[in-house]
Amino acid sequence: MLKIENLHVDVDGKRILKGIDLEVPAGEVHAIMGPNGAGKSTLSYALAGRDGYEVAEGSASFNGKDLLDMEPEERAAAGLFLGFQYPVEIPGVATLTFLKTAVNAVKKQRGEEELSALEFMKLVKAKAADLKIDQEMLKRPVNVGFSGGEKKRNEILQMAVLDPKFCLLDETDSGLDIDALKIVADGVNALRGPDRGMLVITHYQRLLDHIVPDRVHILADGKIVKSGDKTLALELEEKGYAAFGIEKAA
Amino acid sequence: MSSALDILLRGAGESAAAARLRESGLPTPRLEEWKFTNLRPLEKFLAEGGAAGNAPAVPAPLSEGAVQIIVRNGRLENVFGDVNGFSVNRSTSGAAPRENSAVADMVAALAQGALTLRIERGAVLEKPVELVFLSDGADGPAHHASVAIEAGENSEALLIERHMGDGGYLNANAVTVTLGQNARLRHIKVQDESPDGFHLADISAELGRDASYHRFILTLGARLARDEVHAICAGEGAELRLHGAYAGAVEQHMDHTTHIDHAVPHTSSHEVYKGVLDDRARGVFQGGILVRKDAQKTDGHQLNKALLLSPKAEIDSKPALQIYADDVKCSHGATAGEIETDQLFYLRARGVPEDEARALLVQAFLDEVFDGIREDDLRAALIGRLHAKLGMGDAANG
């Protein structure tokens, strides 16, 4: 489903990713772990198409299509969803308006009929209830004044409403207490299915107790240095990065 | 004396205002007050004459059921006797300018009569009054209107002032607003002039004890526009609110200059101006707040923000606070910036195409200024006009 080959990415003229090879088939959840500065966020931004993340070499395809050739909105319409490590505040735009604009923009690009106000509200209410998001929060401007937990739940709500084919979650667990983590993990697990792929990027093994991955990859200094099954995460947690020959970068 | 001034003053009587104008000429950027706004394009237009446009039709009211008063090329078309607590009348001469203002002088020297809109003491107007200025340049390149608004004690009203037109012309107007004790006036101005028009306005407001004057301006039109407000909180408990939103594109020049005078204790002012400038548009904000020595417990807040959508767009912002009392709460803030790339990427990553994402962010930036307009239909109509205007410029080149 997602296939990355020899991906090199520069940020501000500096090489951050130095040849990533990774394939995530439909139905599988892969985790990427790595120390700060390993290139985790660079990978997620490059895949989502953010300006300033220059692909110097290599390729990434999504269901056989060249991902790197698409605008960010086209990637979203194709079914790629990025859950942000730091969800962005947008004063003046109500969360509901934001969600509706996104859902209908994606539908429009796919040539599907846009949702009516009623259909949309029904969909959002159901998904919000699952994530314990109250209606009041949906009326507030996007992420403005939200707690860390609210921001991450809002990311998962967007994901649930947009119903993507592939979920790329960038440190969705950072800044969450255990209760919030469980709600978020439940939300993610509810979306697991045979037709959907997921790539979960995290700094901490803790998340992987709740979102159990099929494969774990360790990213260090812009490369995947080791891959294994879920036990690799536990081993890493126990022995630390140094045991894998990884120095903690700044 | 400039030739443009000759053209303007041809036929002007011998008033004090005309004498002052002859003496000083049209304002130039050498004057501190006019540092950022150069009237040379106006002088050129007056010297060369412009193409008259088609007479604009009277528009549907912005707010349903509003009573419309039409002023065409500076002339009042309909007179109202005292109906439901308000009246509109012609008078032969305009009010003498209260302030040292070139625009007020120009209008005082050249306006052929004035119109007076009076809201009777204690009257609570159920329907808004809509003052519609239509211009087409057919009666000469420039016209001048002098308007006096008198809100009697304990009265309450919503006044909508609209400026629309076609072709090239100068629409200059001077408005005096007098609020009696405990009068409440909300005044919404929509400047939607022809793209070839010039708009110069001077507003002089005096607030009596416990009076409340909420002014909102939406500036969209004209190639060069200046809206200059002089407001004095003259009675204790007076509350002033000046809100403004503007959207400029191509080579439009939009100047909002305000002077707030807190003359007595326990008065407040709240000022928010927000604008979006695209292409080579230029915005000017000059905000003066004067707190006199005796005006203790003054509450004065000013904010102006501009969003620049193009590298060639420009905003000049000059706050000027003079505070002579020591027990006051005053603040001001000014920002100018571009659309946040984080916000833009967030929207695009959710599938919203770039143009649509930009439009949404611009709208979000300006919407706050409209929050104080309570009437849903009116607020929607104003936001609708703004959005139509924003669709005009080339938003994708920023």
Image: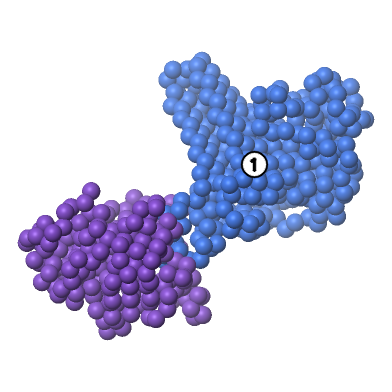
Chain colours: A purple, B blue
- In the picture, measured across the screen, residue B126 lies left or right of residue B195, that is left
Q: Residue B43 lies in what quarter of the image?
A: top right
The residue under the point 40% across, 63% down is A55
Query: In the rendered picture of this protein, how many numbered marks are placed on residues?
Result: 1
Residue A233 position, x and y percent, is 13, 67
- The residue lying toward the viewer, choosing from B335 and B379, is B335
Please determine whether, in this image, residue B292 is positioned above or below residue B301: above
Residue B92 position, x and y percent, is 86, 31
Q: Which residue is mark 1?
A: B282
Q: Residue A53 lies in what quarter of the image?
A: bottom left
Q: Amino acid at mark 1?
A: Arg
- In the picture, measured across the screen, residue B37 lies left or right of residue B333, that is right
The chain that hosts pointer 1 is B
- In the picture, measured across the screen, residue B169 lies left or right of residue B299, that is right
Please determine whether, in this image, residue B9 is positioned above or below residue B77: above
The residue under the point 55% across, 23% down is B290
Q: Residue A238 lies in what quarter of the image?
A: bottom left
